[in-house]
Image (spheres, helix red, strand yellow):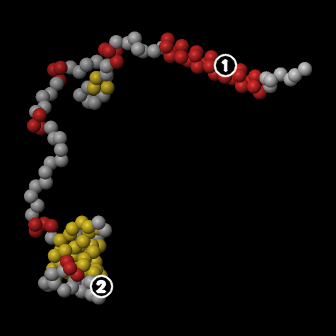
Amino acid sequence: MAKSQETWNKKEAEKKKAKNKKDKEQKKQERKANSKSGNSLDDMIAYVDENGQISSTPPDPDKKSKIKVEDILTSVPKKGTVDPADSIRKGVISFFNDQKGYGFIRDLETQESIFVHLNGLVDSVKESDMVTFNVEQSPKGLNAYDVKLVVK
């Protein structure tokens, strides 16, 4: 007599599959019974009152305020004209290497260290000299240019 092909593990796996299939069908039936697809559009609409709170009642039309289309800003406002004198900064040369032709300026206002190259100098400078300069953004950071010595 041959041994049965179904082992205990196979039987248990089939029982588990059948139970999962039955549970899935039962959940599907529950979802169908409790669905809100029969609700009308009015039941699904929500309103926002003047305080920004969500409510189920429409807002009072008497409290409606008029807004002019011109008053709505849709972009960043343009900057005003910049005075060239405002872009000039003051600082002190914190380090300068004459042989390599570069150094750093410590900005007096922001206390940040700004790179300066020999090409950006108008006057010759040395460490601890007071200077005025302009700043430009480079890929590596801020660069000073038009560096002038302040006469004391």
The amino acid type of the residue labelled 2 equals Lys
Residue beneath the point at 19% across and 86% down: 124
Report the residue at 86% width, 23% height from top. 3
Place residue 49 in its image quadrant.
Answer: top left
Image side of residue 19 versus residue 42, left or right: right
Viewer-nearest residue: 12 or 50? 12
- Residue 108 % position (x, y): 23, 73
Q: Whole-Å distance between the Cαs marked 2 and 1?
A: 82 Å
Name of the residue lying farthest toward the right: 1
Percent across and percent down for residue 27 are: 56, 18
Q: Amino acid at mark 1?
A: Ala
Q: What residue lies at 16% left-to-right and 41% top-to-bottom?
A: 73
| Disc nearest the viewer among 2 and 1 | 1
Residue sticking out furthest to the bottom: 99
Q: Would you say the residues marked 2 and 1 are in contact, meaning their CB atoms lie under 8 Å apart?
A: no
Location of residue 88 (image quadrant): bottom left
Image quadrant in which the N terminus is located: top right
Q: Which quadrant of the figure contains the C terminus?
A: bottom left
- Compared with 4, 140 (above or below) is below
Q: Is residue 131 visible?
A: no
Q: Secondary structure at mark 2?
A: loop
Count of labels shown?
2
Residue at which label 2 appears: 100
* Residue 18: assigned label: 1
Residue 119, given in percent of the width and then of the height, sits at: 20, 79
Dot 1, crowdedness within 10 Å: few (<14), some or many (≥20)? few
Instruction: Locate residue 22 relative to residue 37 in the image: left or right.
Output: right
User: What's the mark number on residue 80?
Assistant: none
Give the structural element (helix, strand or loop) at label 1. helix
The answer to whether any part of residue 66 appears in the image is yes
Horizontal and vertical percent for residue 68?
10, 33
